[in-house]
Amino acid sequence: MKKIIGTLVLWITGWKAEYPAENFVLKTVMLAAPHTSNWDLLYALAVYWKKGIKARFLIKNNYTKGIHGYFFRWLGAIGVNREKNTNMVDFAVNLFNTSDTLVLMVPPEGTRKRVDQWKTGFYHIAIHAKVPVSLGFLDYKKKIAGVGGVIYLSGNFNHDMKIIEDFYKTKTGKYPANYNPKIY
C-alpha cells in the first residue's frame, strides 16, 4: 500500500526518486536535508515507500499518542518523551542495537529555520551504533528526492563533515534562505 502511495505522490507532484541500489543498507542514520519545510517529510517518505524502505523518525511522544498517534506511527514516527532527561543519542543507539533493520531519518539542522551549523547528534549516533550515514536529500530546484550516497564514518569529524558538506552544498531547500550550506 505504501509503495503505491509513494509512487502516486511523486507522480502527482512531478518529483523524481533517486535511490540507487548501492545506497540501500539495512541499518543507517539517514540524513534529511535540507530541511526548510513541513513538505519535506512527504517527499522523503514518498521516495522511501516507493523503494520499499521502512524509514522511521523521532518525534515528540504526544504526536504518537491518542487517535492521531496511529497516523504518525503508521508514517514511521517513534515517540520520544522530551519531558524526561532523555539522551537522544543513547536512545537512538539503543534503537539500532535492538533492531535488525532501521533506517532512522534525522534532520541535522534540527529545525526548518536557518541555523549557523548542524547539530551533531546524527554523527554520534552513527559512531556509537556502528552504522553508516546515508545522504538523504531533497532538491526543490530539480524536484528530486533520494539518497546520494552512504558514508562509513572515519571518526575524524572534520574530514567526515567536509565530505557531507560538499554533497549538500548543491541541494536547494523549498525555502533557500532557510538553508545554510556551511554545516559545521
Image (tube, helix red, strand yellow):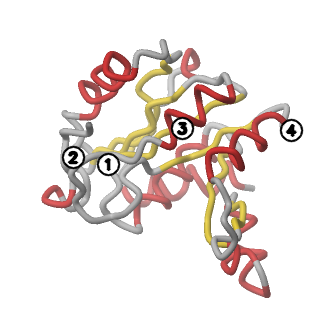
Q: Position of residue 71 (x, y in %)?
A: 72, 74
For the residues carrying marks 4 and 3, which lies nearer the camera in this image?
4
For the residues carrying marks 2 and 1, which lies nearer the camera in this image?
1
Instruction: Please give the label number shown on residue 30.
Output: 3
For the residues carrying marks 2 and 3, which lies nearer the camera in this image?
3
Label 4: few (<14), some or many (≥20) within 10 Å?
few
145 with respect to 122 (left or right): left
N-term-proximal mark, 4 vs 3: 3
Mark 4 and mark 2: span between their CA atoms? 35 Å
Instruction: Please give the label number shown on residue 172.
Output: 2
Mark 2 and mark 3: span between their CA atoms? 18 Å
- Residue contact between numbered discs 2 and 1, judged by CB atoms under 8 Å: yes
Label 2: few (<14), some or many (≥20) within 10 Å?
many
Mark 4 and mark 3: span between their CA atoms? 18 Å
Q: Residue at x 26, y 39 (%)?
A: 183
Residue to which mark 1 is pinned: 34
- Residue contact between numbered discs 2 and 3, judged by CB atoms under 8 Å: no
Mark 3 and mark 1: span between their CA atoms? 12 Å
N-term-proximal mark, 2 vs 3: 3
Q: Residue at x 64, y 24 (%)?
A: 131
Q: Secondary structure at mark 4?
A: loop
User: Is 67 rendered above or below residue 39?
Assistant: below
Q: Amino acid at mark 4?
A: Thr
Q: Secondary structure at mark 1?
A: loop
Q: Residue at x 69, y 45 (%)?
A: 90
Q: Secondary structure at mark 3?
A: strand
For the residues carrying marks 4 and 1, which lies nearer the camera in this image?
4
Label 3: few (<14), some or many (≥20) within 10 Å?
many
Q: Secondary structure at mark 2?
A: loop
Q: Position of residue 83 (x, y in %)?
A: 65, 76
Residue to which mark 4 is pinned: 98
N-term-proximal mark, 2 vs 1: 1
